[in-house]
Image (spheres, helix red, strand yellow):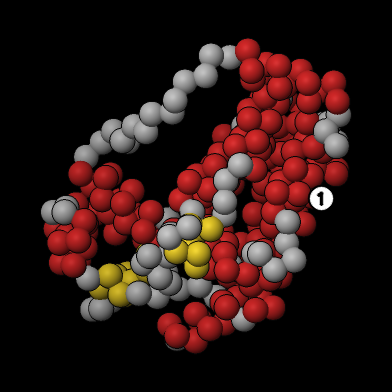
């Protein structure tokens, strides 16, 4: 359980704030930025699956962007590691491999634990309140898309991202936060592949609550251990199911 007094203070702080409906704002910038965000979202949602060839003309037609905007967006996604550029072949969605999954999980667990420990040292009641709020919101949402249970709900995915961001928001190192964000994005494709497997003997809400409880209690060791276990559990499920190996074989 979250320490009673800290939980109550955080909850009172959140409830005292005027609540407004969130407004989704398009990111400012050029058509290239819009194309980048759209294609990136398709990749993270696995609607553009790992290893799929990306035909620029098809993307222009399907998404309604110019040739130049799509080319530049794909170049940016290449630098982010979500797309690969193949000489004389064009672009494809970066494949997933078991070796990369293990590596990403290990590095992310290390970096995100450092961010969390820093946040615990520097966080204030506003930080605690945001953890409480995002955890509550996440607990009210269904992981799977009702229209397609093989895919993660985009609403849940957004809440999940904001929960993990809330945990580390008080970290005082911009570079650690930047690295954590990069690793989170890379982890997303693997986690979404595991969505149909997550229901089997796994309680994601309890995992998230254990991390939040220890974090708000300022127990850095327990919080970091719970975070590492949470990240590694997804990896163990994926490896045991051989889902990643199947994707790896398809794109070899």
164 or 147, nearer to the observer: 147
Point 71% across, 22% down: residue:
11
When the figure is inspected, residue 244 is found, relative to residue 149, above or below; the finding is: below
Q: Name the residue under label 1.
A: 225
The image quadrant where one finds the C terminus is bottom left
* Viewer-nearest residue: 110 or 244: 244
What residue is drawn where x is 38% and y is 29%?
23
The quadrant holding residue 177 is top right
* Relative height, residue 126 to residue 50 (above, below): above
Q: Residues within 10 Å of mark 1 (few under 14, many from 20)?
A: some
Whole-percent x, y for residue 77 in the image: 36, 57
Residue 89 in the figure: left or right of residue 109: left
Q: Position of residue 153 (x, y in %)?
A: 49, 54
- Please identify the quadrant where the N terminus is shown: top right
- Residue at 20 percent of width and 61 percent of height: 62
> Looking at this view, is 100 or 241 the one in front?
241
Under tag 1, what secondary structure?
Answer: helix
- Which image quadrant for residue 215? top right
Q: Is residue 123 visible?
A: yes
């Amino acid at each position: 359980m979250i320490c009673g007094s800290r939980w109550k203070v955080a909850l009172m702080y959140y409830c005292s704030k005027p609540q407004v409906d969130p407004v989704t704002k398009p990111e400012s910038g050029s058509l290239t930025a819009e194309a980048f965000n759209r294609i990136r979202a398709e990749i993270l949602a696995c609607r553009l699956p790992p290893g799929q060839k990306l035909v620029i003309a098809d993307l222009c037609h399907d998404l309604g962007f110019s040739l130049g905007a799509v080319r530049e967006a794909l170049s940016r996604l290449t630098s982010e590691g979500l797309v690969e550029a193949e000489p004389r072949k064009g672009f494809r969605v970066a494949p997933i491999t078991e070796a990369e999954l293990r590596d990403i999980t290990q590095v992310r667990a290390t970096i995100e634990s450092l961010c969390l420990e820093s946040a615990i040292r520097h966080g204030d009641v506003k930080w605690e309140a945001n953890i409480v709020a995002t955890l509550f919101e996440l607990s009210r949402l269904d992981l799977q898309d009702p229209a397609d249970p093989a895919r993660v709900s985009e609403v849940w995915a957004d809440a999940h991202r904001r929960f993990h961001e809330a945990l580390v928001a008080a970290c005082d190192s911009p570079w650690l936060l930047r690295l954590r964000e990069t690793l989170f994005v890379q982890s997303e494709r693997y986690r979404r592949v595991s969505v149909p497997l997550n229901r089997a003997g796994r309680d994601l809400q309890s995992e998230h609550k254990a991390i939040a409880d220890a974090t708000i209690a300022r127990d850095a060791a327990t919080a970091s251990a719970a975070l590492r276990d949470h990240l590694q559990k997804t990896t163990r499920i994926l490896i045991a199911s051989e889902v990643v190996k199947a994707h790896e074989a398809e794109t070899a």
